[in-house]
Amino acid sequence: MGVSTRQTNLKGVRRSTPVFLLLMAAALSTPFSAAAAEEGARDCHRLYRMTDLSYAVEPGVRVKTSDGVPAHCRLRGVVNRAIRVEVTMPDDWNGRMMFTAAGGNAGILVETRSLLSRGFAMATTDTGHEGQLSTFMRQPEALIDYAYRGVHLATVFAKEAIARYYGQHVEHAYLQGCSNGGRAALLEALRFPDDYDGILAGAPAFRYQEFFPWTLHAHRAQEANPLTQESLQVLGAASRAACDSLDGVEDGVLNDPRRCTSAEFDLTKLECRAGQTDDCLTAGQIGTARTMYAGLVDENGVVLSRGVAPGAEDDGDWPIWVVGGTEYNAALGLAPGPLNGLVLETFKDLLHRDASFDLDSFDPVADRDKLDDVAAFMDVDRADLREYESRGGKLLMYQGWNDYPLRPERAIDYLLEVEAVHGGQGKAREFFRLFMVPGMGHCAGGPGAWITDYVEPLVDWVEKGQAPERIVGTRPDGSFARPQCVYPKLARYVGGPQNEASSFSCE
């Protein structure tokens, strides 16, 4: 695994050389070292010679050590006329590559420097279009590139560039991504199981047939009886007061929000009394909150979309998705407004060929099958990862308990599907593990201990066979740490300083 299927020119090796001889050449070649910096600068520049009918490659650029980032070669190119790729290669290479898949609608080259100091070569792609707007989805090839081809072709390019630069192949290839990047990561495991040895999939944005109808359902409730920043503060304070102590530790985090039922968290107690305007919700706002928590069901009571878990309403995703975050939107190049509403623009672009589609009349229950044909090819529609498993691949997935747009039990549902296909919990855990993060929103943020290094545990699992049982996260301010446990285990306080991870066990 980790070897490109495209034949590669190594030093003194012809393109037509069989794969097994390429592997032998890689084994016999010597690693690039800092002592070869001058030669490396020449090699970096000359990587433009990878240019052919498939690749358009800029001359590589040597980047000096700065702000803790080691000296490296930065290469940029374009695959198949549109798919931009960036690859960074440190002087002191450890034989590994980490590819980062972009979130949202992609359209940007995300950072490729964070792991250089640890010896990784890094790579990323914009998947073939520029910017976060979804209008590219009206173009069939651009949509397929975004769906899965862009990451795969960029992976092939990155591996070839790394092999050319160092004179040896990538020994272990890793992929990380969250949200859309998590979806792209799962699709790599499903559709191109030879590409990566280890995959880190955070809060995967899959199941469009569920995601878009629920988003529309929630947005309509918000438009009818809007929650405000102040009402989110009321909800956040109330959920903490009702459920924070259920795990025996009052830390502002709901360890397992499923325990915060309506028996503990009674929304009716928040309704404004006659003449009251502060620290309360109107009857209409309580109805909107109930819509968010309850999810979406059909006429027979079957749950079609899971609801949002209680907790972190005022310190997580709710503000930008429900009310709107101007600074956040501006950073992404998006118009002002709640993200729930802006996501619906993507909905319209996906269904632009359906002459009967009208967002205002779309029924989130009865019309959801309209998404089947247009979204199925770009979605994670299977839990059969046996090809990836059989090649020794390891997949670590993480999910925040207080993720608003990609509600946590969606990830749990997928885990259960994987277990059903792969012979039960024990067998599935041999290659697939899910870590639920208390107090974390969508990919990051929230009151929990969500600053987490998942890379080292994944590397140890792939290269040493040491499967992760618990991974410690910390709050950004360092005020406390908590273990994240292999689901369905959860962290339980067993005594000692409540701000230390050692005071908790996974049970």
Image (spheres, rainbow, N blue to C red):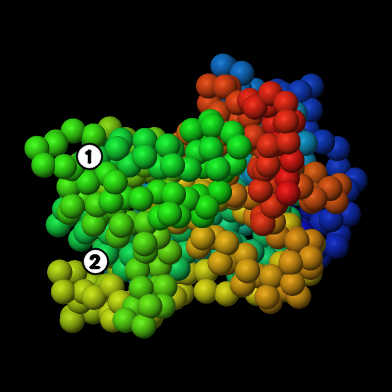
Examine the rendered structure and indicate whether residue 392 appears above or below residue 298.
Answer: above
Tell me the quarter of the picture where residue 305 sits: bottom left
Residue 318 drawn at (x, y percent): 34, 44
Looking at the rendered structure, the kind of residue marked 1 is Cys
Q: Earlier in the sequence, mark 1 or mark 2?
A: 1
Say whether residue 128 is visible: no
Tell me the quarter of the picture where residue 419 sits: bottom right
Q: Residues within 10 Å of mark 2 (few under 14, many from 20)?
A: some
Looking at the rendered structure, the kind of residue marked 2 is Lys
How many numbered circles are shown?
2
Residue 97 left/right relative to 20: left
Which of the two discs, 1 and 2, sits closer to the camera? 1
Label 1: element kind: loop
**Residue at 67% of width from left, 43% of height from top?**
491
Q: Please give the residue where the numbered disc 2 appears in the rendered image.
A: 348
The residues tagged by marks 1 and 2 sit, at their Cα atoms, a distance apart of: 36 Å
Say whether residue 287 is visible: yes
Q: Are marks 1 and 2 in contact (CB under 8 Å)?
A: no
Residue 101 left/right relative to 358: right
Label 2: element kind: helix
**Residue at 53% of width from left, 31% of height from top?**
251
Indicate which disc residue 280 carries.
1
User: In this view of the protein, which residue sits in the foreground, 119 or 413?
Assistant: 413
User: In this view of the protein, which residue sits in the foreground, 465 or 60?
Assistant: 465
User: In this view of the protein, which residue sits in the foreground, 4 or 56?
Assistant: 4
Report the residue that reaches farthest toward the front: 274
Examine the rendered structure and indicate whether residue 437 appears above or below residue 447.
Answer: below
Quadrant of the frame with the N terminus:
bottom right
Residue 476 drawn at (x, y percent): 53, 26
